[in-house]
Amino acid sequence: MSIWEYANPKKFMGWTAPVLPYAFGLAALCLIVGLVWGFFFTPDDYRQGSTVKIIYLHVPAALMAINAWIMMLVASLIWVVRRHHVSALAARAAAPVGLTMTLIALFTGAIWGQPMWGTYWAWDPRLTSFLILFLFYLGYIALWEAIEDPDTAADLTSVLCMVGSIFAILSRYAVNFWNQGLHQGASLSLDKEENVSDVFWQPLVICIAGFVLLFIGLVLLRTRTEIRARRIRALEARARRA
């Protein structure tokens, strides 16, 4: 059986229905465990005090904001190459989720930055590229809504997604590209010396897992909604012709 068969709308609706409860259930479990552990059972940082605990919201949200756009890019490329409608609908479904993650990251970053930097905002390379990514999310969603023909909308938003991917990459690696900037380095890294302390790292990984599972559940749920909406529009168009 080809993997592309799972992109068939009927099969997609079939296999995602039993997956959703597990995705949301595991997401809730990970988020409850990770956030309670992180906020109530980890010590204050010797330099940042209790402010450091916002890491359990900021880092997972920032990671998902970037990876959501990358997922949209992959889905858009599949649409361009294979013309699978579910991939285009999945990219559309992921955009509001990614936008929300970006907002959470920007908001929590401002709260974290104020006591650390003395300001809620600075035109740091990573912060600036993240703000531009937020604007691309807005533009992507607006473009879908502005174009009536769904295939034309999918084509144009795919192009926009490819362009916006530059800023998704910059948001992730801006600290590496520019040595200057207020933003700290990566909280998680293959280099153990760059990781946060284990006492923060362990609940942080659980929170990240919760955000990943929540993202998967929301995208699957929204994609199912998009498929149903397209079916309704097709039935309405058929009824008008009749």
Image (cartoon, helix red, strand yellow):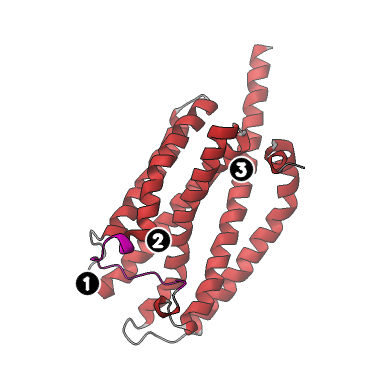
Query: Label 3 neighbourhood size at 10 Å, few (<14), some (14-19), many (20+)?
Result: many
Please, is residue 47 above or below residue 18 in the view? below
Q: Residue at x 42, y 33 (%)?
A: 143
Task: Farthest residue to the front: give it.
Answer: 191
Which residues lie in the magenta part? 175-190
- Label 1: which residue? 118
Q: CA distance from mark 1 to mark 3?
A: 42 Å
Give the percent coordinates (x, y) of residue 42. Answer: 47, 84
Q: Quadrant of residue 13?
A: top right
- Give the left or right position of residue 27, taking residue 38 as reference: right
Label 1 amino acid?
Gly
Residue 185 magenta: yes
- Give the left or right position of residue 185, taking residue 29 as reference: left
Asked if the residue at tag 3 contacts the one at tag 1, i.e. Cβ–Cβ closer than 8 Å, the answer is no
Q: Residue at x 44, y 50 (%)?
A: 99
Quarter occupied by the N terminus = top right
- Label 2: which residue? 105
- Label 3: which residue? 223
Callout 1: SS: loop
Q: How many marks?
A: 3
